[in-house]
Image (cartoon, grey):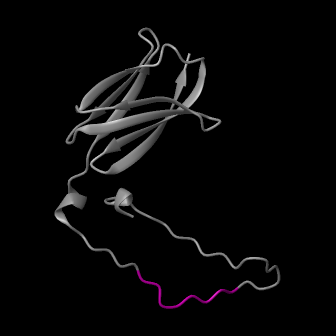
């Protein structure tokens, strides 16, 4: 839930496999969240693919990135590189044109992004 801090979140409840009842009573719903200072310090992560230089550019505003793994849509790891900066360019010129997923690790957390190499 920490990824939704500061956003409006909607929950939906569905009475599954029933077509003749139009009332659903729900009771005692609660969300327990422990807030800490780190949850208020949101790390801004940006990325873009530069089709001229054939590089995937990654930038983290507050913390160093520690690793990036690029996967094909078939789940094959095609690039794996340790990182140690807040800004990195990953050479993906050797990859075939297509859609890829990149998993970037920052502070023990990871973010997966999708990019199109062409």
- Using the image as rendered, state which of residue 77 and residue 51 is in the foreground: 77
Q: Main secondary structure of the magenta part?
A: loop
Residue 43 horizontal/vertical position (percent):
26, 46
Residue farthest left in this picture:
37
Locate residue 24: give its quadrant: bottom right
Q: Is residue 53 above or below residue 87?
A: above
Q: Is residue 29 magenta?
A: yes
Judged left or right of residue 81, residue 19 is right
Query: Percent x, y for residue 102?
Result: 47, 35
Q: Residue at x 41, y 10 (%)?
A: 53
Please say whether residue 55 is one of the residues in the magenta stretch: no
Q: Residue 30's spot in the image, x, y percent?
A: 42, 83
Q: Is residue 95 above or below residue 115?
A: above
Q: Residue at x 37, y 56 (%)?
A: 3
Which stretch did the figure color magenta? Answer: 23-30
Name the residue located 45 percent from the left edge and 13 percent from the top edge.
54
Taking depth in this image into account, of 11 and 38 the one nearest to the observer is 38
In the rendered view of the protein, which quadrant contains the C terminus? top right
Where, quadrant-wise, is the N terminus in this rendering?
A: bottom left
Q: Quadrant of residue 34?
A: bottom left
Residue 19 in which image quadrant? bottom right
Relative horizontal placement of residue 103, taking residue 33 as reference (left or right): right
Query: Is 97 located above or below residue 64 in the figure?
Result: above
Residue 44 x %, y % = 28, 42
Q: Residue at x 20, y 67 (%)?
A: 36
Q: Is residue 67 above or below residue 110?
A: above
């Amino acid at each position: 839930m920490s990824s939704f801090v500061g956003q409006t979140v909607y929950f939906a409840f569905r009475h599954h496999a029933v077509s003749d009842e139009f009332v659903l009573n729900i009771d005692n719903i609660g969300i327990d969240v422990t807030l800490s200072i780190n949850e208020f310090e949101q790390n801004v992560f940006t990325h873009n693919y530069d089709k001229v230089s054939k590089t995937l550019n990654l930038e983290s505003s507050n913390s160093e990135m520690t690793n990036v793994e690029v996967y094909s849509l078939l789940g094959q790891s095609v690039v794996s590189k340790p990182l140690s900066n807040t800004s990195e360019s990953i050479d993906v010129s050797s990859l075939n044109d297509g859609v890829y997923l990149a998993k970037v690790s920052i502070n023990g957390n990871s973010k997966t992004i999708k990019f199109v190499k062409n």
